[in-house]
Image: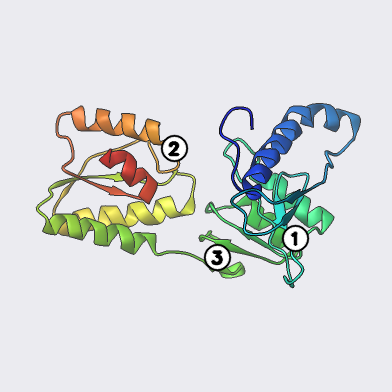
Amino acid sequence: LETGPPPDKLYKAVNLFSSLVRRVAREDKEYLDASGLQFNIHAIMGGQFRGDSSHKLYLVYPQGNWIEITSGTPYHIILTPYSGRDDPMDAVRYVVETHSADGIIISRTEPQDARVQYMLEHNFPFATHGRTDLGDQHPWHDFDNEVFAQLAVRRLARQGRKRLALLAPEPKLSYYRHMTDGFVNGVAECGLTEVPFHNTWVDQPIDRIRDAAIELFKRPGRPDGVVCGSGASAMAIVN
């Protein structure tokens, strides 16, 4: 709160507090594990900020996730912010072991996702946003990223583009494979040339994507079109 403008809604303050909870959990993990203890802080935050339409009440869990508590909601959705610095297994393992929820939805799936394998082994109800190589063993929902990339290439080809680059997802994610397959097939179908855009992906900071794009367009044989795997990354390329 001291490093920026005060939040206008309570949930933003809850997000800030939750980030501090996760930071403390990371910093103290080694000492707690050595002592045989578990980081187990819970907090309730309530009130009304100027941007809130009514009073709000939130319950914050030890993993830094939180729920809004309302009288008319027959169920609770627990939101777990995810950072690349965190072990993605931590939140899943905590929920399964403590039974703090009776179902889990995960995103950013990998082909051999350890979270999926863990929940299958423990017979815990879950669904994924994104596919895995175990897709026939669990429910999932996904966008058809292969078709998206192929359609994007065709659209650029109709506009006269000849040399295309793909700003793809992180290579470890399942939809990286789907999107790159669609892109490669589209380039071959339209008789175009692929310009490599390696070590840069859609989830990186905007400034890093922008700097990488500047370097890409300085190279000989630079692309005359780019397929972007997300809206935010597209804005980095445009700007």
Per the model, the C-alpha gap separating discs 2 and 1 is: 33 Å
Residue that protrudes farthest toward the left in the picture: 160
Q: Could you tell which of marks 2 and 3 lies nearer the N-terminus?
A: 3
Numbered tag placed on residue 204 in the rendering: 2
> Nearer the observer, disc 2 or disc 1?
1
- Quick one: 67 or 190, which is closer to the camera? 67
Tag 3: amino acid: Gly
Between discs 3 and 1, the one toward the N terminus? 1
* Tag 2: amino acid: Gln
Q: CA distance from mark 3 to mark 1?
A: 33 Å
Split into 4 quadrants, where in the image is the N terminus?
top right
Mark 2 to mark 3 CA distance (whole Å): 27 Å
Q: Give the amino acid type for the residue marked by disc 1 in the picture.
A: Ile
Residue 197 in the image: above or below residue 111 = above
Residue 135 pos. (x, y %): 55, 65
Q: Residue at the location (57% across, 39% down)?
A: 84
The label shown at residue 69 is 1
Q: Quadrant of residue 99?
A: bottom right
CB under 8 Å between callouts 3 and 1? no
In what element is the residue under mark 2? Answer: loop
Please identify the quarter of the rendering in which residue 186 is found. bottom left
From the viewer's perspective, is the residue at label 3 or at label 1 nearer? Answer: 1
Which residue shows up at 67% across the image and 59% down it? Answer: 54
Q: Is residue 167 visible?
A: no
Q: Quadrant of the C terminus?
A: top left
**Can you tell which of label 2 and label 3 is closer to the viewer?**
2
